Amino acid sequence: MNQRQFVAEGKSSDGGGRPGKNGDGPKRHEAIYQSISDAIIEHRLKPGARLREDALAEVFGVSRTGIRKILQRLALEQLVTLTPRRGASVTRPTADEAKDVFDARLMVECGLMPEIARRITAEDLAALRDMATRERQALRSGEQSTAIRLSADFHTRLASISGNATLADFVERLCSRSSLILAVYGNAGHLGCESHDHDDLIGYLEAGNGERAEAFMGRHLKAIEASLSIHVEEDEAPDLFEIFSG
């Protein structure tokens, strides 16, 4: 569901043009969480942008308590920063944080490749190839945020094949942070690596060559990190109604 569809479907039927406060439940919260997450990854909400609870509650037609829980969840994923007296704002990744995230990914994801090569199935290979194809299509269509999310999903799915749920969960969190870093400091139309990289990696895993897959993953992640152009932007107070309505 895209942003406009979500807001349109969430509006009340009283003709007021604002979402009605009658859907403050888990499904509603999940949709709002996804909407805010998408806006951050799509760079419509920029790093440093303030996220006022009262404004978001009015935009989405839910309670401030509900919004607070959603912001806390986004903070756990480090997409949002919660500061005493200032409230919530979109996380601004620094150069050091970007390096830390990619260093962690190198250590964990590369180390998982031999076990993944031993455990991978035909069903896994088909799913990964489909994800790689959709990622390339999104890039060709100019859908940068979709491509970033699909790339993160690809790496998360890979990690899950290892059978280590703890490390797979850690990789998922690292990929979420990487998605923000790529959305903010990456280059439009490119994810910092060759479009066929994921297909090449799948080939090594299909052949059971965990050592080659491990080395390739290292080059792949280093290329993405090297492509980043990190710069500082001024904080802003975004028009939340404009971003989440229309």
Image (cartoon, rainbow, N blue to C red):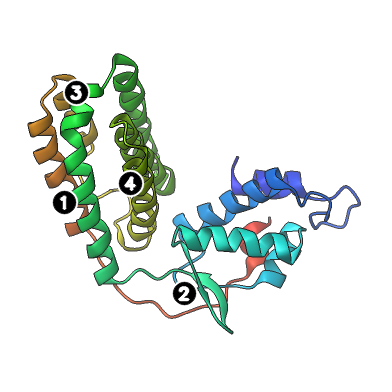
* Mark in the foreground, 4 or 2: 4
* Mark in the foreground, 1 or 4: 4
| Of callouts 4 and 2, the N-terminal one | 2
Give the quarter of the figure containing the N terminus.
top right
Disc 3 is placed on an element classified as helix
Kind of residue at badge 3: Arg
Residue 171's tag is 4
Residue pictured at 72% horizontal, 64% vertical: 65
Callout 3 touching callout 2 (CB < 8 Å): no
Q: Quadrant of residue 206?
A: top left
Callout 4 touching callout 2 (CB < 8 Å): no
| Of callouts 2 and 1, the N-terminal one | 2
Kind of residue at badge 1: Ala
Kind of residue at badge 2: Gly
| Of callouts 3 and 2, the N-terminal one | 2
Kind of residue at badge 4: Val
Query: Would residue 133 appear left or right of 13 to someone viewing this image?
Result: left
Query: Would residue 195 appear left or right of 79 to someone viewing this image?
Result: left
Residue 118's tag is 3
List x then y, in percent, for residue 37.
52, 54
* Front residue of this view, candidates 180 and 124: 124
Callout 3 touching callout 4 (CB < 8 Å): no
Disc 1 is placed on an element classified as helix
Q: Which residue is mark 2?
A: 48
* Mark in the foreground, 3 or 2: 3
Q: Which residue is mark 1?
A: 223
Q: Is residue 145 visible?
A: yes
Query: Would residue 190 appear left or right of 46 to someone viewing this image?
Result: left
* Mark 3 Cα-neighbour bin, 10 Å: few <14, some 14–19, many ≥20: some
Residue pictured at 63% horizontal, 60% vertical: 69
In the image, residue 88 sits, relative to residue 100, either above or below, namely: below
